[in-house]
Amino acid sequence: MVTESDSIPGFRDRIALLVGKDDPFTWAKKIGIPSSTFDRIWNSGSTPKARHLIRIADTCAVSIDWLLTGQAPHGDGDAEALSLPGLFPANSLQALPGASGARLAMTVASGDGMEPTIRDGDILFVDISVTAFLDDAIYLIASGTSFVVKRVQHLLNGTILIKADNPAYASETLLPEKAANLRCIGRVRWIGRAG
């Protein structure tokens, strides 16, 4: 039985994906998780009891398997790729360019910082098996409790350049000690145009 004293690697990151841009404690209240319980989950890395896991899974339309392991259930072998808020069959996602063998999550772009490449409301499939900035590509980045989609360039000296494709936004240069605070959630592999 999972108790709140257990700590499961990556669990808080998956909760952060579900929370998105909402205030985490407001989100938890909407889900029905007491603030003291959510404080242990959010700030101490504890895993909630089964009743709270079920409440999160039901409300957010994700599986408990995904909450605990980051992977989709393997019942019929057809749901290997994960997405938020639901699961997509692996056979439909594996046909996407660059998706062979990827673990994919779906998110919706918000804002105009990556225009014209990514527009507000576009659907993004993110390869969450990529957890390091490997090349000049577009990544889903976590910094604290904020998530952004930006182009990232990793320089040889450890410096990270974070670039918006929209020229109205400035690029940001992070020296290695600041870059260490960034988390690579995954690499954007496919963009689906909204409306």
Image: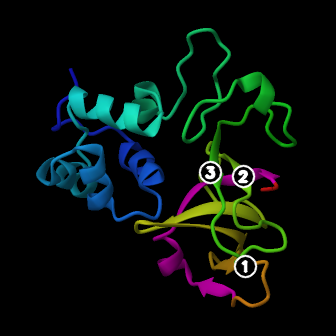
Dot 1 surroundings within 10 Å: few (below 14), some, or many (20 or more)? many
For the point 82% across and 55% down, the residue is 193
Q: Position of residue 54 (x, y in %)?
A: 31, 28
Q: Position of residue 140 (x, y in %)?
A: 62, 60
Q: Give the mark nearest the N terminus, 3 or 1.
A: 3
Where are the magenta residues, as a range?
Answer: 171-192
Residue bearing mark 1: 164
Residue bearing mark 3: 107
Residue bearing mark 2: 123
* Three-letter amino acid code of the residue under disc 2: Ile
Question: Depth check: 94 or 28 in front?
Answer: 28
* Three-letter amino acid code of the residue under disc 1: Ala
Dot 2 surroundings within 10 Å: few (below 14), some, or many (20 or more)? some
Q: Is residue 194 above or below residue 14?
A: below
Question: Depth check: 145 or 185 in front?
Answer: 145
Q: Mark 2 near mark 3, Cβ–Cβ under 8 Å?
A: yes
**Callout 2: helix, strand or loop?**
strand
Q: Position of residue 164 (x, y in %)?
A: 72, 79
